[in-house]
Amino acid sequence: MMDEPTAPRAFRGWALTEATTEDLELHSVADLRERIELLEAEIRRTRDALDKKRNGRAAADAFFSLGGN
């Protein structure tokens, strides 16, 4: 089994850590609503990327399992 490259993970979590530790008391109601919309969009984007990786992995597993049977 081949592991994914580690280079893209060099800064993994930096932006998330920054976003989740920001003082929310400094923001207006409108700012907080916009923040929620942006975070929900990021969740959708992340889920789409996860689904794409899972589908690619499933396709590769199916392809390579054909030769083993």
Image (cartoon, helix red, strand yellow):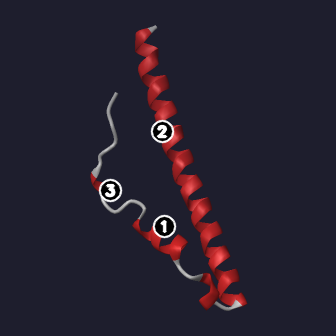
For image coordinates 59% across by 53% down, the residue present is 47
Drawn side of residue 21 relative to residue 30, left or right: left
Q: Position of residue 4 (x, y in %)?
A: 34, 42
Mark 2 and mark 1 lie on one chain; the one further toward the N terminus is: 1
Image: 69 above or below 9: above
Q: Which type of secondary structure does the marked residue at label 2 adopt? A: helix
For badge 2, the amino acid type reads Gly
Residue type at mark 1 is Leu
Q: Residues within 10 Å of mark 1 (few under 14, many from 20)?
A: few
Label 3 crowd (10 A; few <14 / some 14-19 / many >=20): few
Residue 16, label in figure: 1
* C-alpha span from label 1 to label 3: 15 Å
Residue 10 placement: quadrant: bottom left
- Amino acid at the residue labelled 3: Pro
Name the foreground residue: 35 vs 18. 18
Q: Quadrant of the N terminus?
A: top left
Mark 2 neighbour density, 10 Å: few (under 14) some (14–19) many (20 or more): few
- The numbered disc on residue 50 is none
Determine contact: label 2, label 1, CB under 8 Å. Answer: no
Contact, CB < 8 Å: mark 1 with mark 3? no
Which residue is drawn at the image coordinates 53% and 79% (left, top)? 22
Q: Position of residue 9 (x, y in %)?
A: 34, 55
Q: Residue at the location (52% across, 74% down)?
A: 21
Circle 3 sits in a helix, a strand or a loop, which is it? helix
- Tell me the residue that label 2 is attached to: 56
Q: Is residue 32 above or below residue 48?
A: below
Q: Could you tell me residue 12's position as x and y percent?
A: 39, 59
